[in-house]
C-alpha cells in the first residue's frame, strides 16, 4: 500500500492476495503487522496477570465488605470484579489470536501483575487499595497504548477500551471515598 505521485491511495491488491496465502497458520499476523509480536505478547500477558489479580482482589473485597453502607460498596466491588474478569478474557483471546499462549499460572501471578493483591483492613482501606490498583492499571495501559501506536491497532484498541473502564473504576472509588455513592 502506498501513495501515488499525486498522493492518492494506491493498493497493490495482487501482492496483498499473494501474501495472504503465505504463512496461513499465522492467523491475523500478516507481513504488514507492524509491531514486535513477542513484545506485544509479553505486554498482553502482563496485563492479563494484572486483570486476574484485580478480579481476585475485588472478589475478596466483595465478600469481606462490612459496616455502614457496605451493601452498596460490595455491589460496586462485585461489578468491578466481573468487569476485570471480562478484561482478562479479552486479553487472553487476543494473545491466542496473535499465536501466543495466555499465562494463567497461579504461582507467578502476583509477581507478573502490575497491581498488587491487597486485602485491606476495613472498607475504606479496601476502597483506597482499589483506587491505587486502578491508578497503576491506568498508567501502565496508557504506556502500552503509546508503545503500540499504529504497529498493532487492534491490540491498541482493546487496551483503549479497557483503559476507559479502568478510569470509570477509579472514578467510582473516588466517589465511594467521598461518600457520594
Ligand atoms: Fe480491568
Ligand atoms: Fe478496574
Image: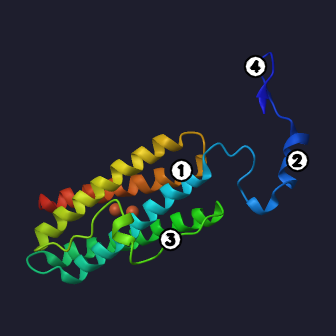
Asked whether mark 2 lies closer than 8 Å to ligand 1, one says no
Q: Position of residue 140 (x, y in %)?
A: 37, 50
Which quarter is ligand 2 in?
Answer: bottom left
Tell me: 126 left or right of 30. Answer: left
Q: How many marks?
A: 4
Residue 25 left/right relative to 133: right
Q: CA distance from mark 3 to mark 4?
A: 45 Å
Q: Earlier in the sequence, mark 4 or mark 1?
A: 4
Residue 157 image label? 1
Q: Give the number of the disc on residue 129.
A: none
Real-space CA distance between mark 3 and mark 1, rounded to the nearest whole angstrom: 21 Å
Q: Residue at point 28% right, 73% down?
A: 57
Quarter of the rendering containing residue 122: bottom left
| Residues at discs 2 and 3 in contact (Cβ within 8 Å) | no
Residue farthest to the left, as pictured? 68
Residue 2 is drawn in which quadrant? top right
- Closer to the camera: disc 4 or disc 2? 2
Residue 55 sits above or below residue 131 on the image: below
Amino acid at each position: 500500500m502506498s501513495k501515488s505521485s499525486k498522493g492518492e491511495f494506491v493498493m497493490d491488491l495482487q501482492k496483498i492476495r499473494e501474501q495472504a496465502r503465505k504463512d496461513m497458520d499465522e492467523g491475523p499476523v500478516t507481513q504488514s503487522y507492524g509491531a514486535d509480536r513477542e513484545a506485544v505478547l509479553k505486554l498482553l500477558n502482563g496485563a492479563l496477570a494484572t486483570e486476574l489479580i484485580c478480579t481476585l482482589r475485588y472478589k475478596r473485597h466483595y465478600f469481606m465488605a462490612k459496616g455502614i453502607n457496605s451493601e452498596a460498596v460490595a455491589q460496586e466491588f462485585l461489578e468491578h470484579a466481573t468487569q476485570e474478569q471480562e478484561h482478562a478474557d479479552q486479553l487472553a483471546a487476543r494473545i491466542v489470536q496473535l499465536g501466543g499462549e495466555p499465562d494463567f499460572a497461579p504461582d507467578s501471578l502476583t509477581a507478573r501483575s502490575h497491581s498488587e493483591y491487597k486485602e485491606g483492613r476495613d472498607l475504606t482501606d479496601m476502597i483506597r487499595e482499589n483506587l491505587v490498583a486502578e491508578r497503576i492499571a491506568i498508567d501502565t495501559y496508557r504506556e502500552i497504548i503509546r508503545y503500540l501506536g499504529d504497529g498493532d491497532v487492534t491490540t491498541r484498541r482493546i487496551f483503549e477500551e479497557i483503559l476507559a473502564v479502568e478510569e470509570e473504576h477509579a472514578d467510582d472509588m473516588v466517589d465511594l471515598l467521598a461518600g457520594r455513592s
